[in-house]
Image: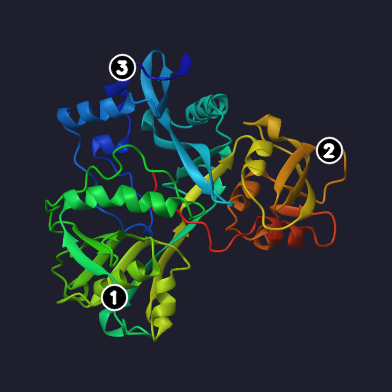
Amino acid sequence: MKIEIRPVERSEVVDYLKVLPYVNGLPNWEPAPSAGHGGPEAWPPPRRPATEQQLKVWAEEVMQDHFHSQAAFVDGKLVGGSAMLSLAITVPGLRAVSFGGVTATAVIATHRRRGLLRAMMQAMFDEALERGAPLAALSASEGSIYGRFGFSPATMRARWELERSDARFTDSEIPSGSLELVDAAAARQAWPLIHEQIRQRQVGELTAQPGQWDRLSDEAAGTDGPMRYLLHRDVDGNLGGVANFRLPWSPLPEHAGTLVVEALQASTPDAYRAMWMLLTDFDLTRKIVAPSRPTDEPLRWMLRNPRAMRITRQSDNLWLRILDLPRALTARAYDTSADLTFAIEDDSMCPHNVGTWRLAVSPAGATCTRTDRRPDLTTDIQSLSSLYLGGMSAAVLAGAGRIRPHRLGAVTDTARVFRVDPEPFNSFGF
């Protein structure tokens, strides 16, 4: 058996696409109810197999400069594929750091468990390091797959529900500005403007992919009806927020009258409050569902009864992987001063990360260098990747045995160094 791992050539792109589940109409959703899905069913039905026209469109996307493919060939046949997108993420200190976003990944069922995914992942890590990206990230369809490659959850997301009858605000005064229901064309123009403002001040938020919102449409999708779009403008006419929502049809009385907020971002408190006040009191509805929302949603604290906003699903969101440890740790900012020494004992895919490191941080900057000092703690690369954006608890990881302290107070010091407020969040995956 001859195995070859390499980028696909233009003549091989359609074969590469055909190994991906969503192209074949096979399941590609999470195998358990997802916090990213707003419908009452566990997950949306599988797509139909791609048409020749869709394959041509996707093939052009694969060949774009930001899309770095890798494919697995066995005896000359393409049997697996993956890719990295060139993106950036906002890290503590509100700095943009480049990363490789792993996407479009599959190995056909007849060739699983032969090390092909690991080989493709290694090739992508090596290529990302050559491009100067100190991080990799992905949206995991299953929680048991990617830990062995060094990835670990770094942001969380929630799906919540709110009965319209319980959506009473502590302050009923209408915020300033104006709201407007618009079509998809207006939403396609608004989203890049609002998202870029949010990305610059939200730790964990990602740069948009080219054409991120091009597929927004006014056309109905099955029985769900068309997506609807809401804009907020301030008193001077400046754009302050945008939301996508839908009103799915249901034959079941318990699911009828549900409004699903698929996406909402606001650059001002007035825009945020005004949009939620409308969406939680929309005519002829009785329940609001919002998937893929931050776990620390401010809306809860605007309600007279904060308990009324019920989190019905919660899960990990972005999985992060540190590729270049010293470069990654010095790329983010720190709010406190500390001198922390830690050991990484194993990282087979990025062995340059193994060793004992001294991390000296202050609000003025950070250094991360190798040292012979006795470590304050030992951790694995997965736990350090979870801590990196500042949303995970060092104490919880220590309680799980993932961080082993060697001096009193080491875990507390680690938590103080890495934690941020508000929690990191990314509004979409890839």
**Which image quadrant for residue 309?**
bottom left
Q: Taking 429 as reference, is 117 above or below it?
A: above
Label 3, label 1: how far apart the Cα atoms are:
50 Å
Label 2, label 1: how far apart the Cα atoms are:
55 Å
- Residue on which the image places disc 1: 277
Please name which of the two marks, 3 or 1, marks the residue nearer to the observer: 1
Please name which of the two marks, 2 or 3, marks the residue nearer to the observer: 2
Q: Position of residue 252 (x, y in %)?
A: 16, 71
Residue type, label 2: Thr
Q: Secondary structure at mark 2?
A: loop
- Which residue is nearer to you in this view: 346 or 79? 346
Q: Is residue 150 left or right of residue 143?
A: right
Q: Position of residue 391 (x, y in %)?
A: 57, 58
Q: Secondary structure at mark 1?
A: helix
- Which residue is nearer to you in this view: 141 or 123? 123
- Residue on which the image places disc 2: 371
Image point (48%, 31%), residue name = 117
Q: Taking 192 as reference, is 100 above or below it?
A: above
- Residue on which the image places disc 3: 10
Image point (11%, 51%), residue name = 219
Badge 2 density bin: few <14, some 14–19, many ≥20, Cα 10 Å: some
Image point (45%, 38%), residue name = 87
Q: Is residue 367 left or right of residue 59?
A: right
Q: Is residue 364 left or right of residue 18?
A: right
